[in-house]
């Protein structure tokens, strides 16, 4: 796995809807810009060897970093794979839609639900949103949120941006009734 760079973003929201948020709502994102392991190979029918080689290392690299950057227990989480223009969306999906990647974050966050994801092919500097859901109950609406990020110089055509996002709480000033009230 060839990592070009790792970027960490944190955000603390102190006010929402004209009201204070106390304590501030904190979220964190860690992104790794990596060389696409299938770059230059044309269509690769069997992605599994590359997935087995790269996905566990990415999960091991990113999961502790995003938890540390958050600096609080994780309540909501998500993941992303943004593939450079010469790659396939399936390349990014293969790396993030495997337990070999996701279980690192689930263990670090004491989570049980599947990680929501965004994956797409895009040019360097593209803005993308990472969706988040509650770590143990995906029906908890207050934790349905997204974090907007971008990497100014990535992904290059032969790269993939792989990311993990975490929030220490639900949306600031969340007021929607639980999903169970609509059944």
Image (cartoon, helix red, strand yellow):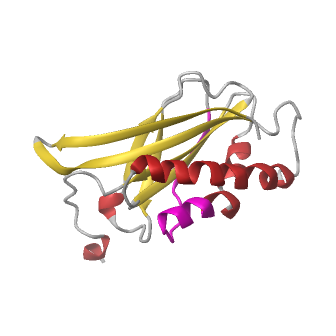
Between 85 and 105, which is closer to the camera in this rendering? Answer: 105
Residue at 44% from the left image edge and 37% from the top image edge = 9
- The image position of residue 168, as x and y in percent, is 35, 56
Tell me the quadrant of the picture where the C terminus can be found.
bottom left
The outermost residue toward the left is 19
Rendered view: 18 above or below 67: above
Answer with left or right where residue 86 lies relative to residue 183.
Answer: right
Can residue 165 be seen here? The reply is: no
Rendered view: 93 above or below 76: above
Tell me the quadrant of the picture where the N terminus can be found.
top right
Tally of marks: 0
Answer with left or right where residue 105 lies relative to residue 37.
Answer: left
* Res 138 quadrant in image: bottom left
Segment tinted magenta in the rendering: 103-121
- The image position of residue 90, as x and y in percent, is 72, 46
- The image position of residue 112, as x and y in percent, is 51, 71
Answer with left or right where residue 57 lies relative to residue 117.
Answer: right
Q: Is residue 110 magenta?
A: yes
Can residue 41 be seen here? The reply is: yes
- The image position of residue 144, as x and y in percent, is 36, 56
Between 132 and 24, which is closer to the camera in this rendering? Answer: 24
Residue at 42% from the left image edge and 45% from the top image edge = 28
Between 101 and 141, which is closer to the camera in this rendering? Answer: 101
Residue at 32% from the left image edge and 48% from the top image edge = 26
Between 94 and 15, which is closer to the camera in this rendering? Answer: 15
Residue at 61% from the left image edge and 30% from the top image edge = 122
Q: Is residue 113 magenta?
A: yes
Rendered view: 126 above or below 133: above
């Amino acid at each position: 796995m060839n990592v070009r760079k790792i970027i960490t973003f944190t955000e603390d929201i102190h006010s929402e809807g004209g009201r204070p948020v106390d304590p501030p709502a904190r979220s964190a994102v860690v992104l790794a810009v990596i060389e696409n392991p299938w770059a230059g190979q044309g269509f690769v029918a069997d992605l599994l060897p590359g997935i087995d080689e790269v996905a566990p290392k990415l999960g091991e690299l990113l999961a502790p970093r995003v938890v540390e950057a958050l600096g609080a227990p994780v309540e909501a989480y998500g993941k992303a794979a943004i593939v450079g223009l010469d790659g396939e969306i399936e390349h990014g999906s293969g790396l993030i839609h495997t337990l070999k990647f996701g279980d690192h974050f689930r263990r670090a966050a004491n989570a049980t639900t599947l990680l929501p994801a965004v994956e797409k092919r895009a040019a360097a500097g593209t803005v993308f949103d990472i969706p988040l859901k509650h770590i143990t109950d995906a029906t908890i609406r207050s934790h349905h949120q997204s974090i907007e990020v971008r990497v100014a110089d990535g992904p290059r055509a032969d790269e993939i941006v792989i990311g993990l996002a975490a929030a220490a709480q639900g949306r600031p000033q969340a007021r929607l009734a639980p999903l169970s009230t609509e059944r």
